[in-house]
């Protein structure tokens, strides 16, 4: 029971994943999704990188992928409008 409560608190800190955003994301062709995943700016690397371990969220009718940089591991995000 304690473990379940601890995991619930962790999820609260990460934010809520939007099911409608995920539906929009999955409705895109796979080739387009792969290109977008590999075209994310990392401020730490100062380069275009691949996003990994990302979540799909929605803000003001745009999809946002939030995850980590494949090269350095820092947090990155990709806005898809």
Image: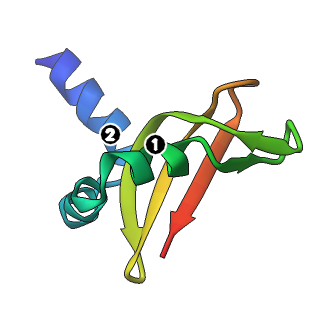
Among the 4 quarters of the image, the one containing residue 7: top left
Measuring 37% from the left and 52% from the top, which residue is drawn there?
56
Disc 2 residue crowd, few under 14, some 14–19, many 20+, Cα 10 Å: few
The residue labelled by disc 1 is 34
Q: Where does the image place residue 66, in percent across and percent down from the top left?
A: 51, 48
Q: Nearer the viewer, residue 31 or 22?
A: 31
The residue labelled by disc 2 is 11
Measuring 84% from the left and 43% from the top, which residue is drawn there?
47
Disc 1 residue crowd, few under 14, some 14–19, many 20+, Cα 10 Å: few
Gap between marks 1 and 2, in whole Å? 26 Å
Measuring 30% from the left and 54% from the top, which residue is drawn there?
29
Q: Where does the image place residue 46, in percent across and percent down from the top left?
A: 89, 44
- Observer-side mark, 1 or 2, equals 1
Q: Nearer the viewer, residue 24 or 9?
A: 24
Horizontal side of 13 relative to 68 (left or right) equals left
Image vertical order of residue 3 relative to residue 49, above or below:
above
Image vertical order of residue 59 relative to residue 9, above or below:
below
Q: Where does the image place residue 58, in percent across and percent down from the top left?
A: 37, 68
Measuring 32% from the left and 46% from the top, which residue is drawn there?
30
Horizontal side of 47 relative to 52 (left or right) equals right
Among the 4 quarters of the image, the one containing residue 63: bottom left
Specify the farthest residue to the right. Answer: 46
The answer to whether residue 19 of the structure is visible from this angle is yes
């Amino acid at each position: 029971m304690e473990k379940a409560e601890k995991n619930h608190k962790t999820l609260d800190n990460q934010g809520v994943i939007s099911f409608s955003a995920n539906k929009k994301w999955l409705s895109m062709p796979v080739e387009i999704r792969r290109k977008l995943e590999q075209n994310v700016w990392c401020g730490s690397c100062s380069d275009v990188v691949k996003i990994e371990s990302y979540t799909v969220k929605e803000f003001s009718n745009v999809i946002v992928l939030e995850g980590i940089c494949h090269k350095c591991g820092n947090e990155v995000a990709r806005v898809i409008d």
